[in-house]
Image (tube, rainbow, N blue to C red):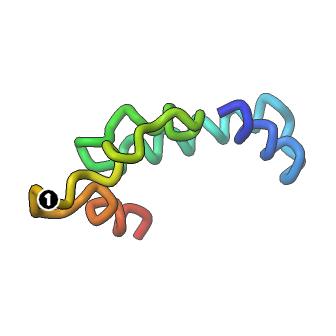
Amino acid sequence: MEKLVNELIQKVGLSPELAQKATSVVLDYVNNNLPDALKGKAEGLLNGNFDMQSLLGNSEGGGDSIIDKVKGMFN
């Protein structure tokens, strides 16, 4: 998340305090709108710590993958 904070400081011109607050708002928003299988993983994703297989799901099991479930998250 530090990278996101730094980008908000550099690219948007936010103060470090406001960049941290904005990052927290984004993290809360994402966590509140993720499917249950991904809840609580947003911070790890923002930090670059994730397992692609767990995010994509196993297509052999049928049903929707995680990616299918998140498609409408920001609508």
Q: Is residue 68 above or below residue 11?
A: below
45 left or right of 35 in image:
right
Where on the picture, by quarter, is residue 47? Answer: top right
Locate the N terminus and report the quarter of the image it occupies: top right
Q: Is residue 61 above or below residue 8?
A: below
Q: Where residue 53 sits in the image (x, y, percent)?
A: 34, 46
Q: Dot 1 surroundings within 10 Å: few (below 14), some, or many (20 or more)?
A: few
Q: What amino acid is at disc 1?
A: Glu
Q: Where residue 69 sits in the image (x, y, percent)?
A: 27, 61
**Viewer-proximal residue among 61 and 5:** 61
Residue that appears at 14% across and 59% down: 60
Secondary structure beneath dot 1 equals helix
16 left or right of 74 in image:
right
**Viewer-proximal residue among 60 and 5:** 60
Q: Is residue 10 above or below residue 49?
A: below
Q: Where residue 45 sits in the image (x, y, percent)?
A: 50, 39
Residue that appears at 46% across and 37% down: 50
Q: Residue furthest front?
A: 60
Residue picked out by circle 1: 60
Locate the C terminus and report the quarter of the image it occupies: bottom left
**Viewer-proximal residue among 43 and 52:** 52
